[in-house]
C-alpha cells in the first residue's frame, strides 16, 4: 500500500512537470451521437474510423487540444478550432458508420483507416484542404475548388467529379457492377 501511494505521488509530480511542456502529446475524448454529415475546418487532421464507439478521440499538444471545438446539431458534426490557430500536433479520430456528406475547408485534412460506406456520398474540399479516403458506395459526387484536393480509393458504381482550375480530384475506384 505504501508503494502505491509513492507511485501515485511520483506520477502526479511527473504529470505536473509535463503540463507546462507544449510538445507533450495528450489525449481527450468528446461524446458524439450518430451523424451523417461531417464539416471540418481550421487546419485540423481528422481520421475516420468505422466504429460503434460514440466518442471523438482527440490527440495533440495541450494548447492544440484546448482549441478544438466539436459541435453537433442533429445529424451534422462540426469540427473546428476556436480563436487563433494553436500550433502543435493535432489529430481527431471520429467514429463513423454511415456518412452522406464530408466537407473540408480552411486547410483541414480528412482521411480514413476504414472504408466509408453508404449509398450516396457528397465530398467537398476547398481552401487548401484535402479529403483522402477509402470508400464503398454506389454513387460518389466530388467537388474540389480553391486549392482543394479529393483522392478516393475503393469501390463505387457511379462517380461524378467537378473541380475548378485550382482544385484536383483523383479517383481510383473499382466498379461494383
Image (cartoon, grey):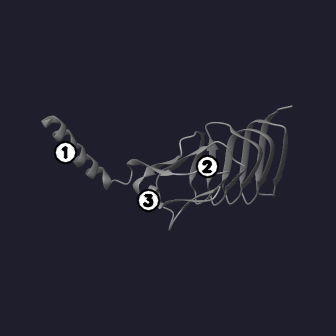
Residue at 72% x, 57% y: name it.
Answer: 147
Residue 177 is labelled as none
Above or below: residue 116 compared with residue 35: above
Residue position for label 1: 9
Residue 66: give its label.
Answer: 3
- Res 151 → quadrant: top right
Q: Residues within 10 Å of mark 2 (few under 14, many from 20)?
A: some
Q: CA distance from mark 3 to mark 1?
A: 26 Å
**Which of the 4 quarters of the picture holds residue 70?**
bottom right
Percent coordinates x, y for residue 115 in the rendering? 68, 37
Earlier in the chain: of badge 3 and badge 1, it is: 1
Residue behind mark 2: 34
List the single residue furthest toward the bottom.
83
- Which circle's residue, 2 or 3, is located before the other in the chain? 2
Compared across the picture, whether 17 is left or right of 170 comes to left
Q: Nearer the viewer, mark 2 or mark 1?
A: 2
Amino acid at each position: 500500500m505504501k508503494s502505491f501511494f509513492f507511485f501515485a505521488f511520483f506520477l502526479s509530480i511527473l504529470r505536473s512537470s509535463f503540463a507546462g511542456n507544449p510538445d507533450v502529446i495528450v489525449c481527450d475524448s468528446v461524446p458524439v451521437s450518430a451523424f451523417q454529415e461531417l464539416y471540418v475546418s481550421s487546419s485540423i487532421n481528422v481520421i475516420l474510423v468505422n466504429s460503434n464507439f460514440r466518442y471523438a478521440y482527440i490527440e495533440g499538444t495541450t494548447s492544440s487540444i484546448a482549441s478544438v471545438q466539436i459541435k453537433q446539431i442533429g445529424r451534422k458534426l462540426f469540427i473546428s478550432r476556436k480563436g487563433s490557430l494553436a500550433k502543435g500536433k493535432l489529430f481527431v479520430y471520429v467514429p463513423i458508420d454511415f456518412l452522406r456528406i464530408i466537407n473540408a475547408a480552411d486547410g483541414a485534412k480528412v482521411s480514413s483507416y476504414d472504408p466509408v460506406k453508404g449509398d450516396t456520398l457528397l465530398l467537398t474540399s476547398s481552401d487548401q484542404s484535402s479529403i483522402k479516403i477509402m470508400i464503398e458506395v454506389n454513387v460518389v459526387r466530388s467537388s474540389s475548388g480553391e486549392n482543394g484536393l479529393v483522392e478516393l480509393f475503393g469501390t463505387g458504381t457511379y462517380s461524378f467529379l467537378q473541380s475548378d482550375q485550382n482544385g484536383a480530384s483523383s479517383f481510383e475506384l473499382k466498379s461494383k457492377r
